[in-house]
């Protein structure tokens, strides 16, 4: 009786996994007791060529220089076939699918690129077949096939070879037009006197096969400098047309290629003369004289001014301005000032004339410069006015017994002459019978002879003459009966007639007591005292009263020195003589003495002082000065200043005598831009500062507001030191990448800056070493920090860029800040979608924290590529849920991690992430673009599958029944005390089956119920494994 060994139909013998099997066969007879026999059956599998060859990896890449010789090998295709051990059995060839892109990222339509490379069918070596040119294509994707020559039927594997053609530095830089290689010149015209640091020009060079490394000036001296990166040339010293009219520079641009190439540009700078010098007069002031009767054209003086500008800009024209400029003429070219003649000069109308001479250059009105100088012209007098008496008739009286020796003065005749320094003479022309009267050169009428007896009046005609012209007046002299003596003041004495009284004295306060004497007796000697106000005798003025009998002068009103410091009154002492009284008039000057009755005060229009100061000024710099007034005088008017509030930290000091305010701490506008101090003005030098010791109506306290003006003393700073973003490989030009933002605590123009991408370093996939900065840059940045692509990204699929982004101030000293923007070029199939049950705005606000936590948990770098409203699998948009698209980067090699690997990492962190996901409302993590395959339904195949299922279920049932019978037989055998191995396996497999029920692709949702199709697949897998296990155990 033989035994036939068969293998289970649900298993497949795979030579590559196991090529030998050893079976232990036991034969049992039917006797009692049953006897057994054993043997070992060794089964050796024979290999069958049933596997297709394949490329490793499927997509292979190569880079080749543009100038590589024809015939050079650029790549060796790698392929395997598990059925054969000799690689020589494989044959290589080109596939049918190919494509290429040009330098602009556009697909190449010409098929010329297909003939650029050849492949050795035996070795798989790919070599250059024709000269390469990046003008044809920069990236070529070729389909390749590998064929197993030993297979009984055709077995082929397909792959892709991507060849990138690398540029070679063989072209030197070229400057922008109008520069050419034949005429490598720039001609510039620049106005002189440009501010130091001004931009002369930006000279940009381009290199078709590399970037510009630096710019350098040769034979420059110290007049200009160049920004080595941008090619901007700046003015570093004064440009003065009067000193130098032209400058020649040589600017050299070096590229970054190897070998390094350079190109020079000759810059010819022609200075343009501008009107930068004003006319300057030879004197600070001019003085001249002219007679008032000078004829028209009379020369007076010559003014002269010079202008150091060259050409017409240095020519000067003259003009006159002033109230009386119409009286004079100035020669516009020579500057000669003369009498105009339109109106005559009159010294009596205006004696001294102050004019302004103006010198103007001949520049256009918009840039014309002028200079002015004072011109003083004194009009000299000529005798053209006759003298005039103040009165046409005078009256006086004399006593009949007047003593004529010495000659007494009767009357002062007054005459005026409008001419300068007139020499007047007086004479009596009529009525002076017997020469009784005389008049001297001063106009004093005296008696020089005895009066005629019985004559009661003389009528005199008196003439005044300046030598050429004259005037006449009448003097009536009446002869009065005798009252011999006139009063004479004793107190105060005539030569020191003054008195003093303190201000604020009470009404009725005695100022002084005047006293006069009269040598007459009786009524002719009795005196009374009065004030003379405009010829009228009175006992009172507005401020004072005089006792007519005692002469006591007292106050009758409050006196305030600050309103008026002195009063002049005229005292009259009159006798009571008859028939004619005599009186004497004497002025009295009353001085009001000061009292300290006024405190310092700030004027109502100046109750707030506002001072402006720059930040960062040196310590103890004078910022401003407050000033109060005190209406008192002398020692009573001293003012002392104190800071009583707002200076708690001692930021400022105050000169208490001068009122000057100084800073005692460094001023930083960004910390505090306004300081408010309250300053007290006091007459007390030892005033105790107390901020509660004043009110809003206190005019001795003033508010000082110090406004700190900004300086450009803070550099810009980016919000993040690095940015991480991704760009899809199918992105075209102007695709938005990200936005960077820099801030500056300064304000205005000092907080304004521009953005530029300084370098775009390319890192090829699998390399942590930069291939250099790509030129022209594939990215651009606008003034708002918005970065976008400038070309299609197809060429850089799976590569990454590190952009050096600079924020530069637009105001001197043009400080810069730099940040790095890391950009990965990805395929959309590499994105992971994180579904959160929160609105997109909330997720965006907490994006950085969420990314940081996920990166730390997975020990990778999570990069957010998009945040949008959630779209369910049915296409419904949920605005309260969010889809966050990310790609994940390995921190070591900086490559995008495959999605299955990331999901395994997330699964391994399940215990840690479970509670975290609940907190941030993460509902699911899944590939953003799952692959979808459409299965075609074939009824025949469905029937076959159903039949197979029935057969498998029947076979499984037979296997289970056999195992149970074997278990019963083993249980009856006393010689074997250990459980049968197959039973342990079944228990283990059952346990494994239970465990497998909880395993899905992502165990984060372990608590969810399995779907019906998942339960069915797992059950079928378990029973198949049971049967496979039975076929591999020893029997």
Image (cartoon, rainbow, N blue to C red):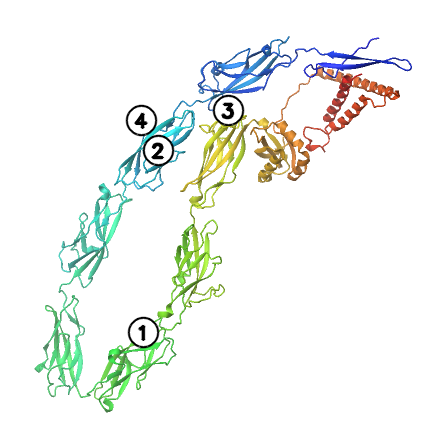
Left/right placement of residue 666 relative to residue 124 reads left
Residue 523, above or below 993:
below
Residue placed under numbered mark 3 in the picture: 795
Sort mark 1 into few (<14), some (14-19) or many (20+) by Cα contacts within 10 Å: some
Residue placed under numbered mark 4 in the picture: 183
Q: Can residue 633 be seen in the rendering of this structure?
A: no
Tag 4 or tag 3, which sits nearer the N-term?
4
Sort mark 3 into few (<14), some (14-19) or many (20+) by Cα contacts within 10 Å: many
Where is residue 514 drawn, in percent x and y? 29, 83
Q: Mark 4: which secondary structure?
A: loop
Tag in front: 1 or 3:
3
Q: Are marks 3 and 4 in contact (CB under 8 Å)?
A: no
Find the distance from the CA under tag 2 to the CA under tag 4.
19 Å
User: Residue 474 occupies which quadrant of the picture?
Assistant: bottom left
Find the distance from the CA under tag 3 to the CA under tag 4.
37 Å
Find the distance from the CA under tag 1 to the CA under tag 3.
101 Å
Q: Mark 1: which secondary structure?
A: strand
Residue placed under numbered mark 1 in the picture: 566
Sort mark 2 into few (<14), some (14-19) or many (20+) by Cα contacts within 10 Å: many
Residue placed under numbered mark 2 in the picture: 217
Tag 2 or tag 1, which sits nearer the N-term?
2
Q: Are marks 1 and 2 in contact (CB under 8 Å)?
A: no
Tag 3 or tag 1, which sits nearer the N-term?
1
Tag 1 or tag 4, which sits nearer the N-term?
4
Q: Are marks 1 and 3 in contact (CB under 8 Å)?
A: no
Where is residue 739 drawn, in percent x and y? 51, 36
Residue 955, above or below 478:
above
Tag 3 or tag 2, which sits nearer the N-term?
2
Left/right placement of residue 469 relative to residue 931 reads left
Tag in front: 2 or 4:
2
């Amino acid at each position: 009786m033989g035994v036939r060994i068969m293998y289970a139909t649900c298993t497949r013998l795979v030579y590559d996994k196991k090529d030998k099997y050893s079976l232990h066969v036991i034969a049992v007879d039917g006797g009692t007791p049953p006897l057994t026999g054993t043997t070992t059956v060794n089964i050796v599998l024979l290999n069958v060529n049933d596997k297709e060859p394949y490329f490793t990896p499927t997509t292979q890449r190569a880079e080749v220089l543009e100038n590589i010789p024809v015939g050079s090998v650029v790549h060796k295709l790698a392929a395997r076939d598990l059925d054969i051990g000799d690689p020589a059995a494989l044959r290589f060839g080109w596939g049918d699918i190919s494509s290429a892109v040009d330098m602009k990222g556009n697909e190449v339509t010409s098929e010329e690129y297909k003939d650029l490379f050849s492949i050795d069918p035996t070795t798989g070596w790919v070599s250059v077949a024709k000269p390469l040119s990046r003008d044809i294509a920069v990236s070529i994707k070729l389909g390749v096939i590998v064929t197993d020559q030993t297979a009984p039927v055709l077995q082929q594997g397909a792959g892709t070879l991507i060849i990138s053609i690398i540029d070679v530095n063989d072209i030197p830089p070229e400057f922008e037009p109008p520069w050419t290689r034949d005429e490598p010149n720039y001609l510039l015209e620049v106005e002189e006197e440009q501010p130091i640091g001004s931009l002369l020009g930006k000279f940009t060079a381009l290199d078709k096969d590399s970037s510009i490394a630096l710019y350098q000036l040769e034979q420059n001296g110290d007049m200009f400098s160049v920004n080595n990166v941008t090619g901007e040339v700046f003015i570093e010293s004064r440009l003065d047309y009067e000193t130098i009219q032209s400058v020649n520079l040589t600017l050299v641009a070096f590229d970054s290629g190897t070998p390094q190439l350079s190109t020079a540009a000759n810059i010819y700078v022609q200075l343009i003369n501008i009107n930068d010098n004003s006319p300057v007069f030879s004197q600070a002031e001019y003085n001249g004289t002219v007679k008032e009767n000078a004829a028209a054209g009379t020369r007076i003086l010559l003014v002269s001014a010079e202008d150091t500008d060259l050409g017409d800009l240095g020519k000067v024209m003259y003009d006159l301005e002033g109230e009386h400029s119409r009286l004079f003429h100035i020669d516009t070219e020579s500057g000669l000032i003369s009498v105009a003649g339109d109106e005559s000069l009159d010294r009596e109308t205006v004696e001294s004339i102050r004019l302004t001479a103006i010198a103007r250059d001949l520049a256009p009105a918009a840039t014309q410069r002028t200079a002015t100088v004072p011109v003083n012209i004194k009009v000299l007098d000529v005798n053209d006015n006759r003298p005039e008496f103040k009165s046409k008739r005078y009256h006086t009286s004399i006593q009949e017994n007047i003593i004529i020796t010495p000659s007494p003065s009767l009357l002062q005749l007054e005459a005026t002459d409008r001419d300068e320094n007139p020499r007047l003479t007086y004479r009596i022309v009529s009525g002076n019978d017997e020469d009784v009267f005389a008049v001297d050169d001063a106009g004093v009428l005296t008696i020089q002879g005895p009066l005629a007896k019985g004559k009661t009046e003389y009528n005199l005609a008196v003439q005044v003459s300046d030598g050429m012209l004259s005037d006449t007046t009448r003097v009536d002299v009446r002869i009065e009966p005798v009252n011999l003596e006139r009063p004479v003041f004793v107190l105060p004495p005539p030569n020191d007639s003054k008195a003093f009284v303190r201000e604020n004295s009470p009404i009725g306060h005695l100022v002084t007591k005047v006293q006069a004497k009269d040598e007459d007796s009786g009524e002719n000697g009795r005196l009374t005292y009065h004030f003379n106000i405009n010829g009228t005798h009175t006992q009172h003025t507005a401020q004072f009263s005089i006792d007519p009998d005692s002469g006591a002068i007292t106050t009758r009103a409050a006196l305030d020195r600050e309103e008026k410091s002195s009063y002049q009154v005229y005292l009259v002492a009159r006798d009571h003589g008859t028939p004619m009284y005599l009186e004497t008039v004497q002025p009295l000057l009353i001085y009001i003495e000061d009292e300290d009755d006024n405190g310092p005060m700030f004027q109502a229009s100046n109750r707030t002082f506002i001072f402006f100061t720059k930040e960062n000024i040196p310590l103890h710099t004078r910022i401003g000065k407050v000033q109060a007034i005190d209406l008192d005088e002398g020692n009573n008017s001293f003012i002392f200043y104190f800071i009583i509030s707002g200076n708690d930290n001692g930021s400022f000091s105050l000169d208490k005598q001068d009122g000057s305010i100084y800073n005692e701490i460094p001023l930083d506008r960004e910390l505090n831009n306004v300081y408010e101090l309250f300053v007290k003005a006091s007459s007390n030098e030892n005033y105790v500062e107390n901020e509660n010791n004043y009110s809003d109506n206190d005019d001795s306290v003033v508010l000082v507001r110090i406004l700190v003006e900004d300086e450009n003393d803070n550099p810009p700073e980016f919000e993040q030191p690095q940015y991480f973003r991704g760009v899809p490989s199918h992105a075209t030009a102007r695709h938005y990448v990200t936005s960077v933002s820099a801030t500056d605590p300064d304000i205005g123009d000092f907080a304004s800056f521009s953005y530029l991408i300084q370098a775009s370093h390319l890192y090829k996939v699998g390399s942590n070493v930069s291939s250099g900065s790509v030129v022209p840059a594939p990215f651009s940045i606008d003034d708002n920090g918005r970065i976008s692509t400038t070309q299609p990204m197809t060429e850089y699929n799976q590569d990454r860029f590190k952009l050096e982004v600079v924020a530069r101030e637009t105001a001197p000293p043009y400080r810069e800040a730099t940040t790095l923007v890391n950009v990965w070029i990805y395929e959309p199939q590499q994105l992971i979608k994180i579904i959160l049950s929160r609105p997109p705005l909330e997720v965006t606000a907490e994006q950085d924290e969420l990314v940081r936590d996920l990166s730390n948990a997975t020990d990778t770098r999570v990069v957010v590529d998009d945040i949008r409203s959630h779209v369910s699998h049915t296409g419904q948009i949920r605005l309260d849920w969010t889809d966050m698209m990310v790609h994940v980067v390995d921190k070591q090699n900086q490559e995008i991690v495959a999605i299955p690997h990331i999901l395994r990492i997330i699964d391994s962190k399940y215990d840690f992430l479970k509670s975290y996901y609940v907190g941030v409302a993460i509902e699911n993590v899944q590939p953003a673009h799952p692959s979808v395959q459409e299965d075609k339904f074939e009824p025949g195949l469905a029937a076959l599958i159903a039949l197979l299922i029935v057969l498998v279920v029947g076979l499984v049932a037979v296997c289970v029944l056999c195992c149970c019978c074997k278990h019963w037989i083993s249980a009856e055998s006393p010689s074997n005390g250990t459980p049968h191995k197959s039973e342990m396996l079944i228990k283990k497999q059952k346990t494994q089956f239970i465990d497998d029920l909880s395993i899905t692709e992502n165990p984060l949702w372990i608590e969810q119920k399995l779907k019906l199709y998942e339960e069915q697949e797992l059950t079928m897998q378990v029973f198949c494994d049971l049967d496979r296990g039975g076929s591999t155990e020893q029997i």
